[in-house]
Amino acid sequence: MTINLHSVSSSSLSMSLLLPSLRPLFSDGDVSSLIELRRDLHRHPELSWQENRTATRLAEVVAALGAETVTRVAGTGVVARFAGRDRSAPLVAVRGDIDALPIEEATGLPFSSSAPGVMHACGHDIHGTWAVGAAMMLARNPAAGDVLVVLQPAEEVGEGAKAILETGALDDVKAIFGGHVDRRFAVGQVVADAGPLAASADTFEIELVGKGAHGARPHESADPVVGAAALITALQTIVARRIDPAAAAVVTVGSIHAGTAPNIIPERATLTGTLRATTPETRAAIGTEVRRIAESIAESYRLTAHATVHLGTPPIVNPPNAAAWARQAASTVLGEAAVVPFGLTNMGGEDFAFYLERMPGCFMRIGAREDGGERLAAHSPRFTAAEESIFVGAAVLAESARVASAALKGA
Ligand SMILES: [Zn+2]
Ligand SMILES: [Zn+2]
């Protein structure tokens, strides 16, 4: 691996970038190679489904770490298998997503994006790197069973996890672990709560069809504009009056289109929006209510409704057993105080949820705010995660795989 560290001096690398409890796990050489990898990925961001350079580079790196097999899957995904101590023990997986966003970078970092209008603004450069770091740890100190290191494309468009599952590459996996950098938490803090951690992200489209007329002769029309106004208000009663107030949910109408002129009542109006929920039950209820209310409001305004709900990513609901394995892993490598509760509800979506529909696992939030740093949100042109979080993510993912593997073997 080429070492090109810019501002970081190699003599003090492990001391400056590693939390004390992680120092026995990473040599200066490990630290510099992972930092170099992260900066290289950051400098060359690629959009969802275009991660060719990224996948090629990551495949080379995991092969060099001693992966038994390295397979390109779903186009720009990579799955690498690291041998366990007992080949008959259950298979587990760790996942890092690798795609970037269509944002012009404004961090001013010396390794800023070289691709105009494309940026690692969600920290997936770190996620890819910590998956490689986990591979490094597992090659040295294997889990009971084999571990798959999954480098996943196209998370930002909510398609990559599903595509990898459809290849069958993870069919034998018994537990999967992943995480997201989070600047609301300091480097060294890890959230691995059981229960809801990210919301479902579905979209809807409703077309209201009526009868057009002259704007001065409304009695000859069936006015979809008035119907749309009533429908928007009625849709807000789903969260207010249909969903348990203790369950989080969102119904947002994000666009409405109708009409061409001030004095013409149009024939149709189209509304689109997003639906969020933190449990599968709430998600299903919201979708049903959107369709029901669209049809009944349309009926009362003499309109016809065509309502479609497009299912996106499911909610992430960490099952208790896998969350406990992840918390145990984080306590082992960082100390018990490192494990903190989420303490908030995240209505963003994350396609790791597709894995959890098929197998147990835990999605973590990994603290990525350096000392005195700002609480920047992901998807900001100024977003960057603290480099120290690479080693936290790597160590916690590797240890989660070991804990899960041992627990599943004993089960
Ligand atoms: Zn993102
Ligand atoms: Zn992300």
Image: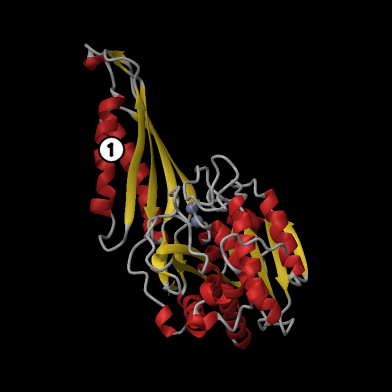
Q: Which image quarter holds the N terminus?
A: bottom right
**397 sits to left or right of 89:** left
The quarter of the displayed image where residue 195 is located = bottom left
- Report the coloring of the rendering: secondary structure
Residue 300 higher or lower than 283, as above or below = above
Q: Which residue is mark 1?
A: 232
Q: Which image quarter holds the C terminus?
A: bottom right
**In this view of the protein, which residue sits in the foreground, 72 or 1?**
1
Q: Position of residue 300 (x, y in %)?
A: 25, 32
Q: Position of residue 99 (x, y in %)?
A: 58, 52
**391 sits to left or right of 216:** right
- Residue for point 31% across, 42% down: 293
Q: Position of residue 134 (x, y in %)?
A: 62, 72
**396 sits to left or right of 299:** right
Query: Is disc 1 surrounded by few (<14), some (14 to 19) or many (20+) residues within 10 Å?
Result: some
Q: How many numbered marks are there?
A: 1
Q: Position of residue 207 (x, y in %)?
A: 39, 31
Observer able to see residue 209:
no
Q: Secondary structure at mark 1?
A: helix
Question: Does any atom of ligand 1 lie closer than 8 Å to the CB of label 1?
Answer: no
